[in-house]
Amino acid sequence: MKKKYFKNLEVLRKKIESYKHSSTDDIKKLLMIRKKLQKKETMRSKLCSIEKLNQWKYTNGKIKHASNQFFTVQGVQVTNAKREVPNWEQVILNQPHGGMLALLVRETKKYGIEFLLHLRSEPGDKNIKFCPTFSATQSNMNQAHGGKKTDLFDMFVKHKDCSIIAKCAHNEEGARFWQKVNENCLFFLNDPNNTKVKKDKFVWANIWQIKKLSLENCLINPFVKTILFMI
């Protein structure tokens, strides 16, 4: 991590601490917003046979997408491991280009330092979760899915209306992903009242509220905590 990022993080830590006694840890409003969105949720997921997937095929010893992007499902052989057993074989997800995980930060006189959480569903989740402001693989950013850009793409990828506080590369779970690296980032919103982030699926929360959300069952995406751990 660059020295300037260490300095930025130190400034952020001091600012958070200065609002400690004036900030609330009440999460009732956050839970209410999530509950309303959950009632409107239309996304449905179910497990199915790989043969039923139109864009995913088994070829040359791996399962991959027709675009040759996203990830592939491959095999891995492990030897001489000092684990439960020394040797084993398994399938693993190979996504070499990784992605970006980011939280947007703002400061206001009324609420102090807050982080923008994105309420969203993932296919493997049962319910909507509080997620990082921005989370996308390079394939998502390339729009390999044929759909629209990830919310706030210009803000995070092109650094419009915000400035970088800090970023650091973190590996994803090595038992499931082959050497995948995500860039974990914190960005500061130049205008705390920027209208681009005023959508139903985005909510501001301070660090004490996020800690309290972490004590609730299955409500917060683990990457939120991964990014905040830099602070």
Image: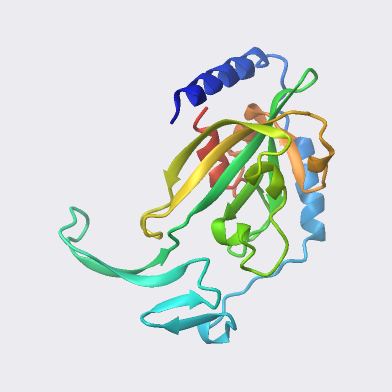
Image position, residue 38 (x, y; %):
76, 56
Q: Is residue 129 above or below residue 67?
A: above
Residue 206, compared with residue 175, is above or below; it is above
In the rendered image, the residue lying farthest to the left is 80
Residue 22: where, in percent of width, then height? 72, 15
Whether residue 125 appears in this view of the structure is: no
Does 82 sit left or right of 147 as displayed? Answer: left
User: For the point 48% across and 75% down, which residue is it?
Assistant: 64
Give the answer, above or below, for where 55 lies relative to 140: below
Q: Name the image quarter holding residue 106.
A: top right
Q: Residue at x 63, y 38 (%)?
A: 103
Residue drawn at x 66%, y 44% as measured from the top left:
158
Q: Along the horizontal axis of the image, is 163 left or right of 199? A: left
Expressed as whole percent of the image width and height from the top left, the position of residue 181 reads 43, 50
What colouring style does the render use? Answer: rainbow
Q: Quadrant of residue 126?
A: bottom right
Number of numbered discs visible in the structure rendering: 0
Q: Position of residue 6 (x, y in %)?
A: 48, 23
Q: Where 135 sits versus 143, above or below?
A: above
Question: Is 194 displayed left or right of 127 in the figure?
Answer: right
User: Of residues 52 and 12, which is closer to you in this image?
Assistant: 12
Question: Image quadrant for the N terminus?
Answer: top left
Q: Note whether residue 74 is visible.
A: yes
Q: Which quadrant of the structure image shows residue 162?
A: top right
